[in-house]
Image: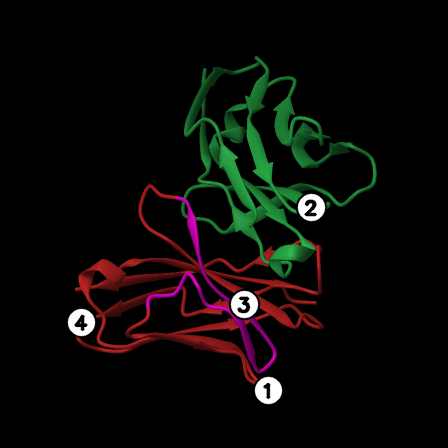
Amino acid sequence: NAGVMQNPRHLVRRRGQEARLRCSPMKGHSHVYWYRQLPEEGLKFMVYLQKENIIDESGMPKERFSAEFPKEGPSILRIQQVVRGDSAAYFCASTGGPNTEAFFGQGTRLTVV
Amino acid sequence: AQSVTQLDSHVSVSEGTPVLLRCNYSSSYSPSLFWYVQHPNKGLQLLLKYTSAATLVKGINGFEAEFKKSETSFHLTKPSAHMSDAAEYFCVVSDYAAGNMLTFGGGTRLMVKP
């Protein structure tokens, strides 16, 4: 049973390009969280999804950012028209249900040049 | 609304001395509480979790935490620090009223001196 898989591990984008970050949850998990970690800072909640539904996106910027978790396939965090301030580590976590531990991926480190 | 406060952003101890990382939470119902550790440039690893069973929870690497409802605290301790314990530690709360969303504290960076 593979853990949470995130890809790519490192992503470099020029300003104005799009970044797509993928997260495959653990087998059997239907809840996915995305967090952003800026250098020397803690994790900031972005969005909480269940299969085909966005449960809470209160931590996600209103513009340029979107997330989905389709019935089939990985969860995708999409950042359009990236800017230097988007450079960060983005972590995905999955859980099997309420009050169960979250398993984290290794993160995607996005660098905008 | 649920929230988590980690009272110290940095803690420095000498190798072999006790570790105390403090965490207070706010939650509407009976929460589940977790401690995660993040080593530099790594993902997060679960240290331990409390989910309404025993209030003293033992985790990996000699860490333990005690759930104190009256104090709304879930402090992380270890009797003797090791150099490999140097990392960032996150206290996390989850409860039904918040839709089981995970809320992270701001993190505590533990430094271990030789």
Q: Earlier in the sequence, mark 3 or mark 1?
A: 3
**Cα distance in 3D space between marks 3 and 1:** 15 Å
Which residue is at the front of the view, A97 or B77?
A: A97
Residue underneath mark 2: B31
Q: Which mark is residue A72?
A: 1
Q: Which residues are magenta?
A: A42-61
Residue underneath mark 3: A5
Q: Are marks 3 and 1 in contact (CB under 8 Å)?
A: no
Q: Is residue A85 left or right of residue B54?
A: left
Q: Is residue B96 left or right of residue B1?
A: right
> What is chain A's hue in the picture?
red
Local secondary structure at mark 1: loop
Q: Earlier in the sequence, mark 1 or mark 4?
A: 4
Q: Quadrant of the C terminus of chain B?
A: top left
**Cα distance in 3D space between marks 1 and 4:** 30 Å
Residue name at image x 61 percent, y 57 percent: B98
Residue name at image x 57 percent, y 21 percent: B20
Task: Kindly identify which chain the residue marked by label 3 belongs to.
Answer: A
